[in-house]
Image: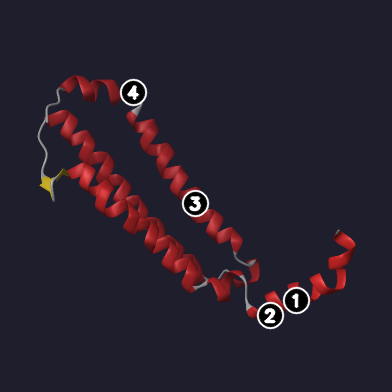
Amino acid sequence: MQAGAAGAMRLETIGGLAFTFQSMVLVFAILLCVLSGSPAKRSPAFLSWMAVTYAVNILVWQQMYFGHQAFLEMGETGWLLGFPAATAWQVYRVWFAGVVLIAVYSAGFRHYVLSEDDELRFEELLRKFGDSWD
């Protein structure tokens, strides 16, 4: 692989914006998960687990972004399982960060998002008003 300082110079003006935008996208995804839960059930434990998932996701994003930036600036990189370091973070760890969010969300789904009582009440409403919505 070859890279020169020209690559780093090209990204100098937009690199920070790209990093910030992706960081905000990660926050947005976590907030959507938080907002899907019942406001009455948004406990500190739930919010803590969401913060952990954000921390994992932002760690992967930081390693990927800054690894690529370092490669552009120095022209050298480490290798992991056949890929340059920044690419290895993307190939082997981005999916893991998503799995952490899915696992946390799935494990707490019945408690924080749709409890059995909420589901029963919803089914009752469907029975009561279901025909009138056609």
Which tag, 3 or 1, sits closer to the chain's start?
3
* 11 shown above or below 62: above
Which tag, 1 or 4, sits closer to the chain's start?
4
Number of residue marks: 4
The residue under label 2 is 117
Label 1: few (<14), some (14–19) or many (≥20) C-alpha neighbours in 10 Å: few
Q: Position of residue 42 (x, y in %)?
A: 57, 68
Q: Position of residue 108 (x, y in %)?
A: 51, 73
The residue under label 1 is 121
Label 3: few (<14), some (14–19) or many (≥20) C-alpha neighbours in 10 Å: few
Give 81 or 15, whichever is nearer the viewer. 81
Label 1–label 2 contact, CB within 8 A? yes
Label 3–label 1 contact, CB within 8 A? no
The residue under label 3 is 29
Q: Position of residue 7 (x, y in %)?
A: 22, 23
| Disc 4 secondary structure class | loop
